[in-house]
Amino acid sequence: MTLYVVRRIGAGILLLLALSMLVFFLLRLAPGDPLSSYIDPMVSMTEQDMERLRQSLGLDQPLPFQYIYWLGETITGDLGRSLQRNGQPVSELLMASIGPSMLLMLSGSLLAILFGIVIGIVGAVRRDGPADVILAALSSVGVSSPAFLTALVGLYVFSGVLHWAPAGGMQEPGMPFTLSGLLSHLALPALILAFGQTALIARYMRSSLLEVLHQDFIRTARAKGVPRRKVILKHAVRNALLPVVTLIGSTLGLAVGGAIFIESVFNWPGMGLMMVTAVEARDYPLIMGGTLAVGAWVILANILTDVAYAFIDPRIKVG
Amino acid sequence: MATTPISHPRAKSPARRALGRFGSKPGAMIGLAVFASLLLLMLVHPLVSGIGPNTIDLRAINQGPSASHWLGTDGVGRDVFARLLEGGRISLLVAVTSSVASLVIGFLIGAVAGLGGRIADAIAMRSVDVAMTLPPVILLLVLASITGPGIGPTILVISLLSWPVLSRLVRSRLLELGQRDFVVASRGMGAGLGHLIWRHALPNSIDILVVFATLQVASAILLEAGLSFLGLGVPPPDASWGNMLFAARSTTVLTNYPWQWMFPGLALVVVVLAINFIGDGLRDAFDPRSEGA
């Protein structure tokens, strides 16, 4: 087991390295002088100073050397300075926005997993009943409507028309921090983030449970007189949950994509909103840092899923 | 002596049977009908209507749906209906062009990986792995930051993003195909990679390609809309469904002038649903096991 975990982490690190290479070389194709990301724009510099800095940073070296230099800096936590935000260090900006993003994505994914599993169970147990048909229609729409559209409609209905939810942001501006304030701002974006993913998880849960319900041990349990409810909840659902676990990893990855749009619509001060403004301003150091952070998060989520899967399903060969 | 021709009931070709199966799917036919009528509307409207997508009517700014402007007007007095159809033309142009491009890239890389030997396979598949690590939207943002906004760059960005899935599908099909006797024979007689790809790989993965191309148009429409919605795709004054929705990021437009963003949003969902139904129908139609089911 330990060996398996170590191997998965090793593969993850390699993948992250490859990703950093891809993004580094891609962004060097972009117009603009990479030197500007190392300069504090508040300090004026002469042409000679620039040349000396270029040499000391190794920017006069060939690209592969530059990459290795950049990698060294990145590993020690120095991601350069943002071009647009008064030269603030990228690492600080990232640190400040990871929290809100995590809060949004984790609560959205948690809701999606919860709803998805419950709806999937209902769909499988009452197969082709009214609840099942409504679910199928809703999940078709859920898959076909993009996150930003759901977010707009949600914002319009619950904030614009019904006035149930605040229009955006994480806190009431100018007010001291309160937990209820945070929760009331979080509820709508988290529910909307959950909407698209719920459909996916529910579909998966439904077909997985249907498969399990047709197996012999379920019939045996029923024949031995175990009540139907108990058979479904204790015997079938446990086994049906196994394949759904793999889906949770990709849900966490997908949440990143949805979160970008939802953060933009709701002005949620997270990574997504930061990435979008960074792209608009062509703030390359910030794009670079943000991409790496997201990549690391997705890879980590996948590793955790694989390990969790190997842990709960003894049939998986480990090693 | 007159010879009576013996009538052989000719067996239908696989393609014809697939077409028959496709025709018997109600979902796919409804999808096709909806998509075709919207397409017709998009193409015919500029020929018969006097109101263009950028015609400005200063007496009607931010007006709701009425007889002269069916879906209302926007903040500078442009007709939302005309812009919606113009947006549809541009969204479809971007989607179809980029789907064709990613079809070609994805097929060629998949084919080289599947038939070109172990080294080519390893290189192609590892790059696919890396490209699929990141959520598509993030890669979309990185690419968009390099190319900048515009119709051409948007097509480029979406094409570069969408091929990895297809490469995987094509590769796994061809790994199996490469072991078949007729391909081994063809190789033995000295066929080069180009011949193998053109004469064997292409006809034998045509079902994968058609289904991918159809579903890819739907996801390209969504990608374009997403990119334009963030202000990084098709820039104004050109209309696209994404940049019409971009206007709704202002709270005034969102709450006071809902017709300006709701109709483009509705069009987007309807078209994507219709194309997805067509794609699902095609997938079932190409699967002979679904005969009679």
Image (tube, rainbow, N blue to C red):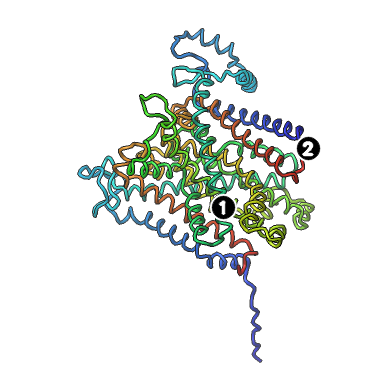
Residue A45 spot, x, y in % from top left: 47, 9
In the depicted view, which residue is nearer to us: A42 or A244?
Answer: A244
Residue A263 spot, x, y in % from top left: 45, 34
In the depicted view, which residue is nearer to us: B166 or B9?
Answer: B166
Q: Quadrant of the C terminus of chain B?
A: bottom right
Pointer 1 local density, CA inside 10 Å: few below 14, some 14–19, many at least 20: many
Which amino acid type corresponds to the residue marked 2 in the rendered image? Gly
Which amino acid type corresponds to the residue marked 1 in the rendered image? Gly
Residue furthest toward the bottom?
B1
Asked if residue B240 shows in the view, the reply is: no
Q: Is residue B133 left or right of residue B189?
A: left
Asked if residue A266 shows in the view, the reply is: yes
- Mark 1 vs mark 2: give the one in front: 1
Q: What label does residue A120 carry, if any?
A: 1
Callout 2 secondary element: loop
The residue that label 2 is drawn on is: A319
- Return the disc, 1 or 2, that comes first in the chain's sequence: 1
**Measured along the vertical axis of the image, is residue A176 above or below residue A103?**
above
Callout 1 secondary element: helix
**Quarter location, residue A252:** top right
**Measured along the vertical axis of the image, is residue A288 above or below residue A319?**
above
Residue B265 spot, x, y in % from top left: 40, 47
Q: Residue at x 59, y 54 (%)?
A: A206
CA gap between label 1 and label 2 equals 33 Å
**Measured along the vertical axis of the image, is residue A263 above or below residue A145?**
above
Q: Are marks 1 and 2 on the same chain?
A: yes
Query: In which chain is the residue bearing label 2?
Result: A
Q: Is residue B125 left or right of residue A81?
A: right
In the depicted view, which residue is nearer to us: B113 or B212?
Answer: B212
